[in-house]
Image: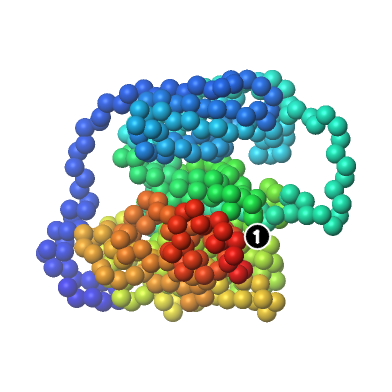
Amino acid sequence: MLVCRRFCILSSGALLVILLTLVRPFQAPTSVSAASLSLSPSSGPAGTVVTAQGTGFVRNRDVLAFWHEDGLKRYFGVAKPDDQGTVTITFRTPTAKLTGAPVPVGQHMVELYQTGDPPRTPTMMFTVTSGATESPSPQPPTPTNTPRPDSKPRRAVIFLQGVSSYSTCPNGEGFLGDKNGAQYAPFWVMSYLGSQEYVTSEITLDSTPYYFSYGGYCNGGSGANGEIASYNGNDSCGDIPNGAFPRLRALIKSVTDKVPGTQVVLVGHSQGGFIATYTVGRLLRDEGEEGRAFVRQRIASIVTFDSFPDGLPDTLEATASLIFLRTCLSLDSPNYRSWEVGGRESKLAVWAGFPEDDGEQVEIYTIGAQQFPSVGSYLNEIFTTAIAERDHLSRPGDSHSSVWNSASEDKQFFVACAALQLRDCKRQQLTVAQNQIQTITKAIVR
């Protein structure tokens, strides 16, 4: 096979491999037993602690709890069913809506969700009988020299997928998981961050995951309230400077405007990681003081999964071209031109992690896989890391897909390090057991 900058002549064997990847065998639908949900209690004032118990789930596959609000779903917890398919999740009902308004009296839907074909989604209504119970006596004012609970840094997480990705309404198949039960990063990242005391003791985590979309959102939303992204593979082939950049900037602004002081962690897979670094680099270098202030105030860190945060290296361009021919049908698609190392977009992306004159810096953390199965072969080569990266985690057992759509302890801890803006994450987390993580983390020099 001749490797060139723009077009590649493929052997008949390589062409056959590409054609085989486009053909999916027919799978007959499988019968699914009905899942059910019960709530205890099923009514009470806003802020009531509720235990949700579900039955009829697939064992050892995550089940998530959601509270429905104005057409949106608020994530409230995750657990794995036991061998009998029973799962229990305890959560506190909200006292305020995402808009800040009090939760109204009346019925509110609670849902348990497990991916599958079809997904298991039993629901039950919880009745809010009154507003949150007031304290029996007023509390004295907090002294100004005492840290307030809300003084902790506040973080929200935005997820970005790559080229050839898609997301469908209403459940986000293709972004959150697939019909075979695979659960992608938005599931296992958020469930891990929200359940770890060493994380929640240091930051206030917005429990709503946010999704970057190459197109639109379900229910006509903007993404600012956690609406599910809605787009197809062709949408991901669009223009990055004039399409993805303004979309991501607007989403960051909307998410961080909800609670002043919030900063986002951008978590991107493949092209999604490049869009994240390009956006930050462009804001820092091309948007003047307004852009630099935007980054300082609203963006905490970037995590890339098997990405090319500084542009696509020549050694991988031939492989990437095959994916583009399969998905975007043209090597002249706008986003492919943006990937080139040395091009304007890549040069801007390089600046994403460099400190400003005042020392302010967006921390970059990169995770790399060594297998690239999308074109039917494996390359013993790690995707590039960022020039200004804070830390790198190598996952030699992961493919380009599995590094994103399967959880592991080291990846979970690595993303937590990024949310906390810690350093030397890889060296620490690869050598500690789960029950030591909290102690070690607090000892890391920031």
Query: Mark 1 — residue?
Result: 298
Tell me if 430 is positioned left or right of 245 in this view: left
- Residue 104, given in percent of the width and then of the height, sits at 69, 26
Quarter residue 334 falls in: bottom left
Q: Residues within 10 Å of mark 1 (few under 14, many from 20)?
A: many
Q: Is residue 223 visible?
A: no
Tell me if 129 is positioned left or right of 251 in this view: right
Tell me if 223 is positioned left or right of 307 in this view: right
**Secondary element at tag 1:** helix
In the image, 111 versus 231, the foreground residue is 111
Task: Assign the N terminus to one quadrant of the image.
Answer: bottom left
In the image, 93 versus 173, the foreground residue is 93
Q: Is residue 27 visible?
A: yes
Residue drawn at x 37%, y 38% as measured from the top left: 60
Q: Is residue 135 above or below residue 267?
A: above
Q: Amino acid at mark 1?
A: Arg
- The number of numbered discs placed on residues in the rendered structure image is 1
- Residue 282, given in percent of the width and then of the height, sits at 57, 70
Task: Assign the C terminus to one quadrant of the image.
Answer: bottom right
- Residue 37, given in percent of the width and then of the height, sits at 47, 23
Q: Is residue 386 above or below residue 294?
A: below
- Residue 411, given in percent of the width and then of the height, sits at 43, 58
